[in-house]
Image (spheres, rainbow, N blue to C red):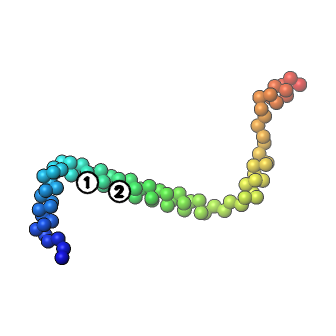
């Protein structure tokens, strides 16, 4: 057996009496906003993942690029080079 439409109607009336229409409207709006935020975050994450897949990053090239960058001098090394 299931719940009949009369029982659902009675349950709906009880819920409306307990919570009130204003509170239920606010709850529905908050729930809708949360769902929109979740969908937007999932969509943005999907775009972000898609951009990362397009680039091939070779670990050897990354280490070579880092080793060819000029190293910054520390403040003590700068003072020594200025003194000379």
Query: Residue at left 60%, top 63%?
Result: 54
Q: Residue at x 49, y 57 (%)?
A: 45
How much space separates mark 2 and mark 1, taking CA atoms?
A: 11 Å
Image location of residue 64, percent across then percent down: 78, 53
Q: Disc 2 or 1, which lies upstream in sequence?
A: 1
Q: Residue at 38%, 53% (x, y): give it.
A: 37
Q: Quadrant of residue 69?
A: top right
Q: Is residue 23 left or right of residue 10?
A: right
The residue carrying pointer 1 sits among few (fewer than 14), some (14 to 19) or many (20 or more) residues within 10 Å by Cα, namely few
- Residue at the far bottom in the pictured view: 1
Local crowd size for mark 2, using a 10 Å CA cut-off: few (<14), some (14–19), many (≥20): few
- In the image, residue 78 sits, relative to residue 26, either above or below, namely above
Is 72 above or below relative to 39? Answer: above
Which element carries disc 2, helix, strand or loop? Answer: helix
* Residue contact at pointers 2 and 1, CB within 8 angstroms: no
Quarter of the image with the C terminus is top right
- The mark found on residue 5 in the picture is none
Residue positioned most to the right: 84
- Residue toward you, 18 or 30: 18
Q: Position of residue 51 (x, y in %)?
A: 56, 59
Mark 1 element type = helix
Which mark is on residue 28? 1
Question: Residue drawn 10% across and 68% down?
Answer: 6
Q: Position of residue 31 (x, y in %)?
A: 30, 54
Q: Which mark is residue 35?
A: 2
Identify which residue, 8 or 56, lies in the foreground: 8
Which residue extends farthest front?
1
Classify the position of the N terminus by image quarter. Answer: bottom left
């Amino acid at each position: 057996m299931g719940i009949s439409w009369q029982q659902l109607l009675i349950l709906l009336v009880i819920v409306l009496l307990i919570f009130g229409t204003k509170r239920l409207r606010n709850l529905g709006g908050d729930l809708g906003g949360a769902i929109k935020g979740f969908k937007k975050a999932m969509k943005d994450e999907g775009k972000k993942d898609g951009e990362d897949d397009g680039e091939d990053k070779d670990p050897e090239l990354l280490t070579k690029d880092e080793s060819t960058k000029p190293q910054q001098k520390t403040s003590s090394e700068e003072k020594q080079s200025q003194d000379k």
